[in-house]
Image (cartoon, grey):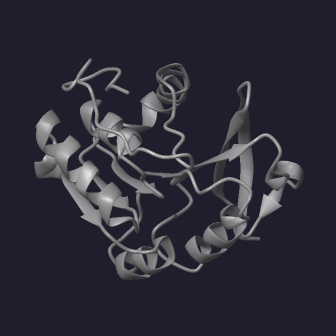
Amino acid sequence: MRVIAGKARSMPLKSLKGRDVRPTTDRIKETLFNILMPEIPGSRFLDLFAGAGAIGIEALSRGAKDAWFIEKSKDACAIINANLEFTGLAEDAHVLGRDVSDGIMELNGKGAFDVIFMDPPYGKGYGPSILSLLSRTDLADEYTLVVLEEDLSDDFAEGDVISGFEITRIKQYRSNRHIFLKREADK
């Protein structure tokens, strides 16, 4: 696992070990950031279920103003911090070692993010519940782009509007997909 582009280009990142770990491949990360690139420079980026922090670190490397990482695993938080120090991107990063729901509530009141990326454990149904929680905070406004990564076997993307958000795009890969959402316009 490595940083694909930007200030920290080609720098290797540490990863967690174990069966449940599924770091985003370089190819999928590159495709994702090709889509996100207009949103990244100068953005506030929120990485939920951050794992080793590779997505938020990629955003910082490509010019995000700051990035927040929420991850409840202490081991993962230690790896995120090590990766941030190694890449020289720690100054613009904030790591919250909390459950994602608790972290969202802690950040509520601090304003909207430009991009929110979430990669929850597959098959647990976290996507809709986290979107519902986000819809009740100020972290996502009508300009925020939310990206949910899910397994192809998950059925989240079946509807058009989910918890105050509407799907604007779906990018499917071999085994997973990215669902791009925006806040539903007030009627």
Q: Which residue is drawn at 20% across and 52% down?
A: 81
Left or right placement of residue 134 versus residue 82 in this view: right
> Which quadrant holds residue 171?
top right
- The x, y position of residue 37, in whole percent, is 43, 28
Q: What is the quadrant of the C terminus in the image?
A: bottom right
Q: Pick whichever, 15 or 116, lies toward us.
A: 15
Left or right placement of residue 108 versus residue 13 in this view: right
Vertical order, 139 against 175 (above or below): below
> Which quadrant holds residue 8?
top left
- The x, y position of residue 123, in whole percent, is 74, 57
Residue 85 visible from this viewpoint: yes
Q: Residue at x 61, y 73 (%)?
A: 135
Q: Pick whichever, 185 or 86, lies toward us.
A: 86
- The x, y position of residue 72, in whole percent, is 40, 68
Left or right placement of residue 44 versus residue 11 in this view: right
Q: Residue at x 38, y 74 (%)?
A: 98
Residue 185 visible from this viewpoint: no
Vertical order, 1 against 157 (above or below): above
Q: Residue furthest right?
A: 158
Q: Pick whichever, 178 or 84, lies toward us.
A: 84
Q: What is the quadrant of the N terminus in the image?
A: top left
Vertical order, 47 against 128 (above or below): above
Q: Residue furthest front?
A: 18
Q: Pick whichever, 101 or 17, lies toward us.
A: 17
